[in-house]
Image (cartoon, grey):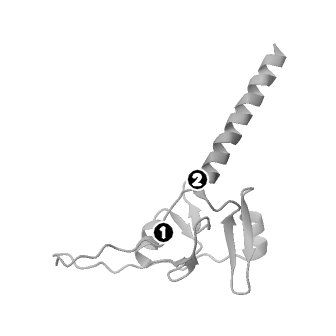
Amino acid sequence: AEMGTLFALSNLAERGTLFVGVGDEIYPGMVVGESNRGSDMEVNPVKAKETSNMRTQSKDEKMYLAPPKKMSVEELIGYMDDDEIIEVTPKSIRLRKAELDAGVRQRTAREKKKRLAAMKEQQLKRGK
């Protein structure tokens, strides 16, 4: 697990509501926020700002971040999707994907879509 950075989270905050803050432990497959678009997005909340030895005219801007939205277990149960689980530890309550690997999640979604299309096709053939 890595720590969320101000640089990465400030960029993500523009896209929706965050459930994690700077310095929170974050790992692949963890749900870190809610997108304004309403769909899942693969993001990198631990990305650090590139540093260089070059001096630039523009100084680093001050970044401000709204506090993360914290939810109780009951709120998470109402919020979660079918492919997500709630992880409860002595120190935290987190929402994460049941399958942590993004590649496996995408493959599973494609296979599910193909199966549904095949089932619809069979139903159409039977209806003729």
Residue at position x 68%, y 69% in the image: 95
Q: Where residue 61 appears, x then y in whole percent?
A: 30, 78
User: Is residue 1 positioned above or below 116 on the image?
Assistant: below
The numbered disc on residue 13 is: 1
**Residue neighbourhood size for the residue with mark 1, other residues' Cα within 10 Å, grouped as few (<14), some (14–19), many (≥20):** some
Q: Where residue 100 appears, x then y in whole percent?
A: 64, 62
Residue at position x 20%, y 79% in the image: 53
The amino acid pointed to by label 2 is Gly
**Residue neighbourhood size for the residue with mark 2, other residues' Cα within 10 Å, grouped as few (<14), some (14–19), many (≥20):** few
User: Is residue 58 positioned above or below 124 on the image?
Assistant: below
Question: Closer to the camera, 19 or 26?
Answer: 26
Residue at position x 61%, y 64% in the image: 29
Q: Say what secondary structure mark 2 lies in.
A: helix
Residue where numbered disc 2 is placed: 103
The numbered disc on residue 81 is: none
Residue at position x 76%, y 64% in the image: 78
Between the residue at mark 2 and the residue at mark 1, the CA separation in whole angstroms equals 24 Å
- Identify the residue at the far right of this view: 126
The amino acid pointed to by label 1 is Ala
Please state if 41 lies on the left or on the right of 91 as rendered.
left
Screen quadrant of the C terminus? top right
